[in-house]
Image: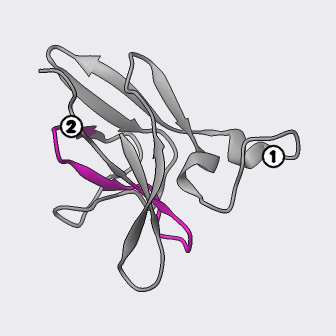
Amino acid sequence: MTFYTKRTGSSFRSEGHAIVIVENKQLQVWQADRFSFDNERLEDGKKAVLARLERVGDDWILINVSGDEMVDATTSQAVAIGDQFKLNDGAKILLSKVDGCRLAYVQVANR
């Protein structure tokens, strides 16, 4: 999963930052915001779990835990809290709509 940051308008720029999707991986609120950094001064609210990544059968899914503005960037459909988002190759999910939010782009390495 590669992260892109929203800049001006609707354009996104690569951050050169990615995570490997593994069973029970959690995304925290700070990971959706380019203005937040994981350090000793991180606010408690930014440490909360935003989403969980899980394997269901042969598929990987993202489960929205607390992101009230999460959106499937391909279809513009909202991903409500508690909803699942299938992580197919090329899938794009906007983790938030606020300024400085991140877009996650899924790249499947081995099939």
The image shows residue 65 at horizontal and vertical percentages of 48, 39
Discs 1/2, front: 1
**Which quadrant does the N terminus fall into?**
top left
The image shows residue 43 at horizontal and vertical percentages of 81, 48
Q: What residue is at 38 percent from the left and 39 percent from the top?
A: 82
- CA–CA distance between discs 1 and 2? 30 Å
Which of the labelled discs sits on residue 20, or is there none? none
Q: Which residue is mark 2?
A: 86
Label 2 neighbourhood size at 10 Å, few (<14), some (14-19), many (20+)?
some
Q: Identity of the amino acid at label 1?
A: Leu
Which of the labelled discs sits on residue 42, or is there none? 1
Q: What residue is at 17 percent from the left and 21 percent from the top?
A: 110
Q: Residue furthest bottom?
A: 9
Q: Is residue 94 magenta?
A: yes
**Which quadrant does the C terminus fall into?**
top left
Q: What residue is at 24 percent from the left and 39 percent from the top?
A: 107
